[in-house]
Amino acid sequence: MLPTNAIIAELETALEKKPSSSHSAMLRAMTDLFVDGPRHLSADHVAVFDAVIGRLIVSNEPAELASLSVRLAPIEHPPMSVARRLSSDDNIAIARPLLEQSSALPDDALIHVAKTKSPHHLLAIAGRPRISEPVTDALLDRGNSEVTHMVAKNEGACLSEVSYAKLINRSRTDKPLAQAIAKRKDLPNELKPFLNLTLDKA
């Protein structure tokens, strides 16, 4: 197998010779090869796909990148550099599928998005099947009311004591939020009296 740098150099040459309209077809072909190919690729092979697809996304339109994100989101071991780039794209249509579904995205990638991107990005993360405590903390640091409610209702969101403190503090002026917190099975007993102050209000 050619070294990755040599493959990218050949790809650059091919892209220069082809009209931009053909770049989409090349991206789809490479994605098909990765998604529909052998399930147990070596790390070297995945690295090649990562580099090649990573180069192709530079010259493709948002609609193609959104489609790519949809296809990569369920993959257990996607090309990681590509997954990170797509999940942090400013265009939520591109980022959402991976933010909502990809179990491969590490916490540091999710935290970066939570700290820097739009409320739509935060809401996508807040709906994930499972969210770690550090990611939940980051969501609640910047999240609006909709994000906060989504986190509180998400039983797969792990809440630290800091996160619970933030939620309960906000629930003082948001009774529906207090009701959502009260339904959580992991609510520490020692925090229930503070929550009840809100729930007992008329």
Image (tube, rainbow, N blue to C red):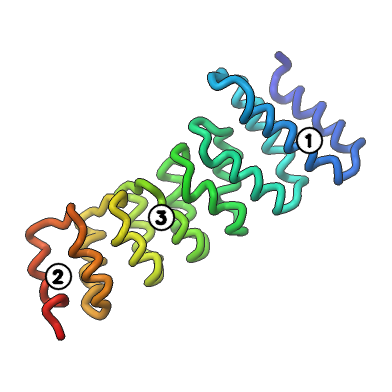
Query: What is the x, y in percent for residue 54?
Result: 67, 38
Which labelled disc corresponds to residue 26? 1
Left or right: 128 as drawn, with respect to 170: right
Question: Residue at image x 47%, y 56%?
Answer: 124
Vertical relation: 53 (above or below) 185: above
Vertical relation: 175 (above or below) 86: below
Q: Earlier in the sequence, mark 1 or mark 2?
A: 1
Residue extending farthest to the top is 1
Left or right: 51 as drawn, with respect to 133: right
Query: What is the x, y in percent for residue 109?
Result: 47, 46
Q: Earlier in the sequence, mark 3 or mark 2?
A: 3
Under circle 3, the secondary element is: loop
Under circle 2, the secondary element is: helix
Along the line of sight, the residue nearer the viewer: 136 or 41: 41
Residue on which the image places disc 2 = 195
Which labelled disc corresponds to residue 14? none
Residue type for callout 1: Met
Question: Residue at image x 18%, y 64%?
Answer: 182
Query: What is the x, y in percent for residue 65?
Result: 67, 48
Query: What is the x, y in percent for residue 64?
Result: 71, 48
Vertical relation: 126 (above or below) 4: below
Residue type for callout 2: Leu
Tag 2: Cα neighbours inside 10 Å, few (<14), some, or many (≥20)?
A: many
Q: Quadrant of residue 183?
A: bottom left
Q: Quadrant of residue 69?
A: top right
Q: Which quarter of the figure is the N terminus placed in?
A: top right
Residue on which the image places disc 3 = 127
